[in-house]
Every structure is written in structure tokens, then in C-alpha cells.
Image (cartoon, helix red, strand yellow):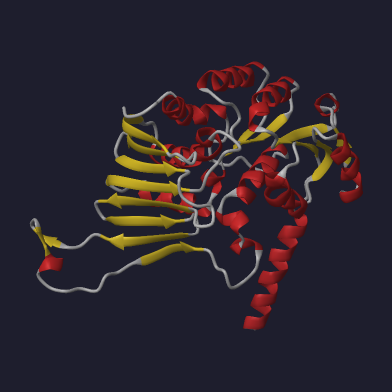
Amino acid sequence: MIGFQDIIKGYKRRRDNQYLSQVYKKNYAFIGFGNHCIHNLYPIIQHLQVNVKYICCSSPQKAKLIPQKFKNVIGTTSIDDILNDETIAGVFVSASPSSHFEIASKTIKAGKALFIEKPPCMCVEELNDLIDKQRLYGPNTIVVGMQKRFSPVTAILRKKLRDKQLVSYNLHYRVGLYPEGNELYDLFIHPIDLVTFLFGDAKILGVHKTNSKNGGRTYLLMLAHNHIAGTLELSTSYSWREAHEAICINTESGMYDMQQMETLTFTPSSLSFGKIPLEKVYTRNSCMTSLYSRNNFNPILANNQIISQGYFNEIKVFVDRVECINKPAIPTDFTSLRTTYEILDKLDKIEGTL
């Protein structure tokens, strides 16, 4: 007779064997090696044991230090060395946003699979050019690093909302000053892409833009999708220390509330008799269900922010597709960004109120 201990040991053995059997055999290269890459992307690459042959950066001094830090990795300042190497199957790009379009174009033309951090380009015209190149030079794997698409919270929301009667949503994305880049394409691209990913194509119903004296910028935006409309507050006039991101989605059956991509709850709608809200007639306890919550107690990979924010899954999806392990259902290429970029382009041209 099999006891509980045997069942537990069997489960752990299968879990460990599954991890050990996931072996990636192809060679990859990294273009760009800044803060985001060092702290978010490359640790995932190391965990997955992906074979990185090159790391390319603009600094010759940094390129010389790379082989000392990473065993069997070549440091280089030449993108052409990577693209001309026939042993390289895929390229990760996380460089300066202004250089992404040119690097992406060269990588696609060279026939390499491409993972590129956001933004892949800086306008709709460049996006359309990348789409044309993608069609011209073949069906190689392309993943754009819109990590919120790969978050467990997003997956749960998409599944829950599929058969719901949608009413409205409101989203807040509040961070501090951002003098080092373009807040629309570097920061606000994420919440805008999230709502277009959840609800589909959208048109702008109204927008108000405020420029603060200290350099902060705020967009109050209203979007209309096919079956829902919502409001967004996108701002760099708050604080990085108290940065906050949340979306509240109201449906006929209840409200979904997501906070910081780390918690997701559902609160059922109040009962009514006819059009009379019964909560005004007699008191009932509120019933809120937790659909997702990152566990801060147990420090394992599944409870890491790299998972909850979507970084881990976007990298794994890319490598799995290059290695022909599986093909995820999540749209990842340039064509899936059209609506997001159309909205960004319109916001970029707004001076005050529309």
C-alpha cells in the first residue's frame, strides 16, 4: 500500500526531474547590458541555463570585463559579429530605446529570432516598417517585452473576463519624475498595452494633459473598446518610492481589483430586488475572493516579483519557441502592438485637452 510519504516523494521526484530535463541547446546573444538587463533579464537567463555566446555593449571597457564575470561568454562592441554568426539562433535586445528600431531591423534581416525590450520603436510608422520586414524576411520568432501580458494576474483576468458582461474600468499608473527618457514610450506604454490586451481595439474619447513645473506629466484619458469603456490616469507627477499601479474592472456580476500586479480580488455585485439594492434594506457581510496574491513568506521562484511582473514568462516563452518546445497562445509580435502604438502616437501629439 502506498503511503502519504511515498506520494510526496514521488511528486518531488517528478518535479525535480521535470526541471532537470528542460535543457536548451541553441546559442543566443545579448545586445545591451544596462541596469534592467543586469537585474531583471539576465538572472532569468542564468536560471534557465540558456547558452549565451555573446554580450554586446557600446563600451569597450565593459566588453573586456564581461568574460571575467561570465564564463564562456564573449564580450563585444560589434553587433555585426553577432548577426554574422550562423550558430546564433536568437538575440535578446535591451539597449537604449532610441536604438531599438535599427537593431531590430538588422536582426530580422539577418534571419535571427528576436526578443526586444519595449519600446521596439518610437512611432507607428516605424512599427509598420518592422511588421513589413517581419513578413519579408520570414517567420522567425519575435517577442516584444511587454511583460504585463505574461503576468499570472493578466492570465487570470483574461480567463475570468471572457464570459462576463463588462461595465467599465479605471486604471491608475503613478510614478515619479522621468527626465531620462520618453515617458509615453518608456513607461505609459505598459498600462495602455495592458488595457488593449485585455479589452481589444480602442479609440480615444477624451484626454487632458498636464505639464507640471517640476517636469512631471499627467494624462487623464478615456478609452472606448468594443464592449467596455474606461478611464486611465498616467502620471510622472507622483513618487518612485510610492509608485502605484492598479486597475479596477466593473462587471455585471462584480468587481475585479488588481493592485501592483501582485494581488487580484473579486467582489460580487450587491443583490437587488427589481431595482432596489438590498444592501440598503438589511446588512450583509461583504464577500471578497482572493484570485491571486504573491506569497511573501516562502522565498521560491514562483513567489518572486520576476514571476508576478511577467519578466520570467516572457523570456521563457521566447526561448521555448526558438527551441521548438511549445507555442504559447499569447500574441507577442509587432502586429499585436498596432492599437497600443496608435494611441501612443495620438497622445504624443496632444498639447492640452482633446
In this rendered view, identify the residue nearer to me: 32 or 115. Answer: 32
Query: At 66% across and 82% down in the image, what residue appears?
Result: 5
Q: Nearer the viewer, residue 89 or 15?
A: 89
Q: Residue furthest front?
A: 213
Task: Tell whether 66 sits left or right of 246.
Answer: right
Q: Can residue 288 be spotted in the picture?
A: yes
Q: Position of residue 115 (x, y in %)?
A: 67, 35
State left or right for residue 272 relative to residue 171. Answer: left
Q: How many marks?
A: 0
Percent of width and height locating residue 186: 56, 37
* Residue 346 lies in quadrant: top left
Residue located at (46% from left, 29% from top): 344
Res. 127 image quadrant: top right
For residue 2, say whether it is visible: no
Q: Residue at x 24, y 59 (%)?
A: 269
Q: Position of residue 10 (x, y in %)?
A: 69, 72
The vertical placement of 311 against 185, above or below, is below
The one nearer the camera, 353 or 258, is 353
The percent coordinates of residue 17 (x first, y second) are 74, 62
Q: Is residue 110 left or right of residue 222?
A: right
Residue at 47% across / 49% down in the picture?
Answer: 154
Of residue 93 and residue 115, the one placed in the foreground of this image is 93
Quadrant of the frame with the C terminus: top left
Q: Quadrant of the N terminus?
A: bottom right
